[in-house]
Image (cartoon, rainbow, N blue to C red):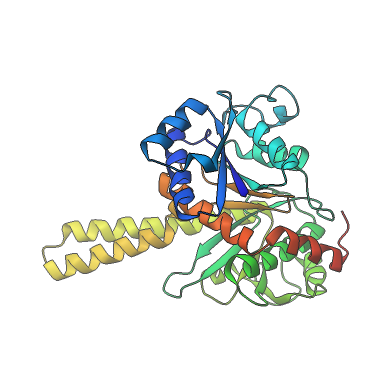
Amino acid sequence: MKKIIIDIYGGDNGPEAIINGALAVLAERKDIGMVFAGEKRLVERIASSQKADLSRISFIDTKTFITNHDNPKNIFRGFDGTSLVLSLEEAKINDEVLGLLSCGNTGAVLIGSIFRLGLITGVSFPSLASALPLPGIGGFVCLLDCGAMVDCKPENLKEFALFGSSYMECAYGIKNPRVGLLNVGTEEGKGNELAKAAYPLIKALPINFTGNMEGCDLLGGKFDVCVADGFSGNVLLKNCEAVGLTAHGFAERLSSESNDRRVKEALTMLSASLYADFAYNDLGCSILLGTKKIVAKPHGKASEKTIISSLRQFLSLSDGDFVNKLTASLKRKELKS
């Protein structure tokens, strides 16, 4: 039986939110098992109270974990008994394990995934990818990188384009996804030195590269993948969420101030819709692409709902055989490590 490792630590809402979310998905999917990295007695108590299928649950028993205040570079030493390191090491050696989920220190997850789990042959650096819903249109767009590599080289963006194309095909069944390069204009030749150098490299790939895209195009439905360096991608991601949630708050305020029942109801519906579309923390997680196993990285503020969405996202990639397809794709394109 295939398994997912769940690091129960690192979330602002405590291990209970992570455990409860994972158990909800375990109940949905009878074909998988889960390995909980953390205090065994705590997980057993919660699982028993929910009458979870204990035959599909195993443990990496530890009370030690990496905090957000720890230096991620210490992943090389001193963190050997922590839930994250033990999870990565188990994922590396256990063929039954599909990958892992951790809400912990992003830098430690990134560095640990590279050096303790390992990268797919041909990958020079992994990328954090987020699938964002398209308001009023339906479907999703993949934005990557979202912050794993803030200082990129053109070759990194070339790999990210390939990652994103494979991601959307495996996770959402989109054939020949439309890939765009984030830029300050749509014309070829626009942008800074990084964008101008990356453009021909991506264009040469046998993917559906549709050229440059601007930030305003991200949620417009014209692209399935937005390729960016980690600095720009992270800024764009947080700006989209902030604008959407600001509009949500504005609609809520207008609703509370209105004395017209129909106007109040309409604004309440609008507010709820805006929150549903732009509260990215509730909608899932970032996925670290390019590692030998799937690594899911929800936000530190992850709720039970976040964990459920994140694991569904994880399983959509697993069901689509993402890692094997990306590995084969990298071999065909002969990308250099």
Location of residue 223 by image quarter:
bottom right
Residue drawn at (71%, 66%), measured in percent from left and top? 191
Residue placed most toward the observer, 196 or 69 = 69
Residue placed most toward the observer, 125 or 157 = 125
Residue drawn at (68%, 61%), measured in percent from left and top? 322
Residue drawn at (55%, 23%), measured in percent from left and top? 63
Q: Position of residue 89 (x, y in %)?
A: 72, 35
Against 162, residue 288 (above or below) is above
Location of residue 94 by image quarter:
top right
Q: Is residue 103 visible?
A: no
Residue drawn at (65%, 77%), measured in percent from left and top? 175
Question: Residue lying farthest front?
Answer: 55
Residue placed most toward the observer, 106 or 239 = 106
Q: Position of residue 329 (x, y in %)?
A: 79, 66
Against 295, residue 332 (above or below) is below
Q: Position of residue 315 (x, y in %)?
A: 57, 57
Query: Seen in the image, is 252 located left or right of residue 5?
Result: left
Location of residue 83 by image quarter:
top right
Query: Seen in the image, is 64 located left or right of residue 111?
Result: left
